Amino acid sequence: MYVSAIVLAAGKGLRFSRPDRRGIPRRYVGRNPKIPKPLIKINSKPVIIYSLNTLSKHPAVKDIIVVVNALNQKDIVRKIRQYAITKVRQIVLGGKERQDSVRNGLKAMDSSTDLVLIHDAVRPFIMKGGISSVIKEAQNCGAAILGVPVKATIKSVASCQSSVVSKTLNRENLWEIQTPQVFRKDLILEAYKRFGDREVTDDAALVEKLGAKVKLVRGSYFNLKITTPEDLVIAEAIVKRLR
C-alpha cells in the first residue's frame, strides 16, 4: 500500500496578527515577529519539523509533498535540509484557499499512490499510533479522519454580529476533527473534481458530499492545532510532556 502525505504549510496565519496582542514572545519567533506559523519555534525546533519528522519515520508513508507559499518557501526548504527530512519528494506552491493548496498537492502525487494522507503543518504533535490507525481504517473503508470528543459546551449564535445565543448543542455526538485525514486516491480526486470549489473547512466534507462513508478514529488531545498565540504556551508544555 503506497501512502503519500500532503503537508499543508501555505496558510497566511492571519489569527496570529491580532491587534489586541503585544506580539509573540521572542523565544518562539527569534528576531522575526512576522515569521510564518510553520516556522515558529517550539523548544528551538520549527513547528513544521515535528510533523514532518513523525511522518518521515512512519513505515507506511512512502513520500511527502509539502505545500508552501512564496514567502515561506525558501525557509521551509532550508529547514527540511537542515533536519534531514528524507521522505520529502516535492515542494509545491499552494493557492489562495486551502482547497487550492490541497489540489496542487494532489497534482504532485506519485502515480503509484494508493492512499492520500492530508495533514496541517501547524499540528506538530501527531503520533505514530494515530497515523497507523487512520491509515488502517482508510484501507478498509476508503476514508478516515482523526477526532476527539468535544469537551466544552457548544452554543450557536444568531449571527456573529449580535452574539445572541440561539441554541445550545448536545455535545454527546459532537467531535472536534483533526488531521491527518486519509483517503483512497480515486475518492479524494473525485471529491475535488466535483466539489472542490465548495467552501468547506476540511477535506472529509468534500468526500461526504459524494455520499461516501468517512470513518472517525479517536485521536489525541495532544494533537493541537496552533492557531492563536495562546496555543504556543500549550504546545511548549506538550513538548515537555512528550519528551
Image (tube, grey):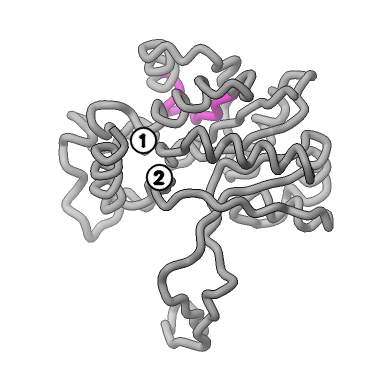
Instruction: Find numbered disc 1 in the image and state the secondary structure of the residue it sits on.
Output: loop
Is residue 69 within the magenta segment?
yes
Residue on which the image places disc 1: 36
**Highlighted range, magenta:** 65-74
**Residue 81 appears at what percent x and percent y?**
41, 11
Q: CA distance from mark 1 to mark 2?
A: 7 Å
N-terminal label among 1 and 2:
2
- Mark 2 packing: few (<14 Cα in 10 Å), some, or many (20+)? some
Left-right relation of 97 to 206: left
**Type of residue at label 1?**
Pro
Residue on which the image places disc 2: 13
Position of 189 relative to 88 (above/below):
below
**Type of residue at label 2?**
Gly
**Residue 4 appears at what percent x and percent y?**
66, 26
**Quadrant that contains the C terminus:** top left
Position of 114 relative to 175 (above/below):
above
- Taking the spot 61% from the left edge, 40% from the top edge, the residue there is 133
**Residue 119 appears at what percent x and percent y?**
55, 38
- Taking the spot 69% from the left edge, 33% from the top edge, the residue there is 116
- Callout 1–callout 2 Cβ contact below 8 Å: yes
Instruction: Find numbered disc 2 in the image and state the secondary structure of the residue it sits on.
Output: loop
